[in-house]
Structures are given as structure tokens and as C-alpha cells.
Image (cartoon, rainbow, N blue to C red):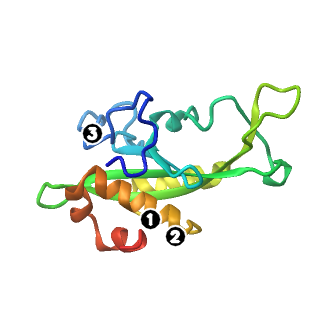
């Protein structure tokens, strides 16, 4: 499991948000019809440093890579940005009740490694429509990994397999194939 996790000295979350109950189940009140984020887990991939880690702060734009970052409107405004992948991974049960990876939505996140002179904030860029749409698609069981390089796909695949070989084996052939198996 620690094949790509180089955060060994940092406090880690408990792992994937796996298979909790439906908060809107049966009561018909406020929130019915809204999407539940209970089974959503953000996985961050840093292909340069070869790190893959879960960061639940990403759900509220407060992940490790987003802290103290001022987002700009255009990628072209950044000086030599570093590419990260923020991957929305969802889980579900198979018809037989076994847990599986259900959906994957990969999104680009760019960040300068140094703050501009006179600023305490690094600058970054992400496409909000891409993040919202790919999160939504992952929640609905779609697999969106378009544009991911082979190294990042490999890192994601090995991280997911290392987290749980059972989840991986119970996942759809479409998901496993999209991640290069």
C-alpha cells in the first residue's frame, strides 16, 4: 500500500470513505434527491515526487496542495506550474454485497512551487467545471481518466490495488481497463 505514499511522517486520514448508509433514505424531507458524498474519496497524485495519497480536504478545496494557493483564471498566467492529479474515487457494493471501486474522475490541478515575490500565497489553476463534472460522473459510476499520462495511471492503479485487492478485483472490467490493467 505504501508503494507511492511518501507522507510517512504526516498524519493520514483513515482511508477511503466506504459504503455508509443513505442519509435521505425513506424520510422524504430536506435533502432528498441531492447527491451523497459518503462514498467519495479524493486521491491526490504527484507524479514528479511519486506520491499518491488520500486528502479529504479536497472535497472543500482545502487539500494539502490547495492550501495557501490563490487560484488564477488562466493557466497561462502561471510560471512553470507543476501538474497534480486530483482523482475523485467512489465506492459501492456489487450485487453480491462485496465492496468495489465504482467511479473515477481525474482532474488536473496546477500549482507554482514558489510564491511570487512579495506574496505569501502560491498561485494555482484548476478548471472548476472539470472538477465538478468529473466528481459528479464518478459519483454516478463513470470512469473519466482522459488526459492522464501513463505514469499517473500506473500510480493510481497500483495505489487502488494496494489499498484493497478485493475492491480492485470486484470493480468493473471497464474501470480496471481504463486504469491500464
- Say if 135 sits above or below 96 in the image: above
Q: Position of residue 90 (x, y in %)?
A: 36, 51
Q: Which residue is mark 2?
A: 150
Q: Viewed as shown, does residue 8 lie left or right of 94? A: right
Q: Which residue is mark 1?
A: 154
Q: Which residue is mark 3?
A: 22
Q: Residue at x 38, y 62 (%)?
A: 157
Q: Foreground residue, 92 or 123?
A: 123
Q: Foreground residue, 25 or 79?
A: 79
- Say if 125 sits above or below 169 in the image: above
Q: Foreground residue, 84 or 100?
A: 84
Q: Kindly state the secondary structure of the residue where label 1 is placed.
A: helix
Asked whether the residues under the numbered discs 3 and 1 touch, taking CB atoms below 8 Å apart as contact, a structural biologist would say: no
Q: Viewed as shown, does residue 96 lie left or right of 59? A: left
Q: Residue at x 43, y 56 (%)?
A: 138
Q: Tell us which disc is closer to us: 2 or 3.
A: 2
N-terminal label among 2 and 3: 3
In the displayed image of the protein, which residue is found farthest to the right? 118
Structural crowding at the residue carrying mark 3, measured as other residues with C-alpha within 10 Å and reported as few (<14), some (14–19) or many (≥20): few
N-terminal label among 3 and 1: 3
Q: Residue at x 40, y 41 (%)?
A: 37
Q: Kindly state the secondary structure of the residue where label 3 is placed.
A: loop
Q: Gap in Å between the C-alphas at discs 2 and 3? A: 36 Å
Structural crowding at the residue carrying mark 1, measured as other residues with C-alpha within 10 Å and reported as few (<14), some (14–19) or many (≥20): some
Q: Position of residue 73 (x, y in %)?
A: 80, 46
Q: Gap in Å between the C-alphas at discs 1 and 2? A: 6 Å
Q: Gap in Å between the C-alphas at discs 3 and 1? A: 32 Å
The answer to whether residue 161 shows anywhere in this view is: yes
The answer to whether residue 141 shows anywhere in this view is: no
Asked whether the residues under the numbered discs 1 and 2 touch, taking CB atoms below 8 Å apart as contact, a structural biologist would say: yes
* Figure disc tally: 3
Amino acid at each position: 500500500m505504501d508503494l507511492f505514499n511518501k507522507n510517512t511522517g504526516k498524519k493520514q486520514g483513515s482511508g477511503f470513505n466506504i459504503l455508509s448508509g443513505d442519509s435521505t433514505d425513506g424520510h422524504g424531507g430536506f435533502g432528498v434527491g441531492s447527491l451523497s458524498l459518503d462514498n467519495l474519496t479524493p486521491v491526490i497524485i504527484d507524479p514528479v515526487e511519486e506520491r499518491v495519497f488520500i486528502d479529504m480536504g479536497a472535497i472543500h478545496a482545502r487539500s494539502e496542495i490547495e492550501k495557501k494557493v490563490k487560484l488564477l483564471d488562466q493557466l497561462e498566467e502561471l510560471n512553470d506550474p507543476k501538474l497534480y492529479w486530483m482523482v475523485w474515487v467512489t465506492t459501492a457494493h456489487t450485487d453480491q454485497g462485496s465492496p468495489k471501486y465504482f467511479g473515477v474522475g481525474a482532474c488536473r490541478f496546477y500549482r507554482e512551487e514558489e510564491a511570487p515575490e512579495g506574496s505569501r500565497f502560491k498561485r494555482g489553476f484548476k478548471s472548476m467545471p472539470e472538477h465538478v463534472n468529473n466528481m459528479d460522473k464518478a459519483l454516478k459510476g463513470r470512469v473519466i481518466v482522459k488526459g492522464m499520462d501513463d505514469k499517473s495511471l500506473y500510480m493510481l492503479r497500483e495505489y487502488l490495488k494496494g489499498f484493497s485487492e478485493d475492491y480492485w478485483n470486484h470493480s468493473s472490467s471497464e474501470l480496471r481497463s481504463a486504469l491500464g490493467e
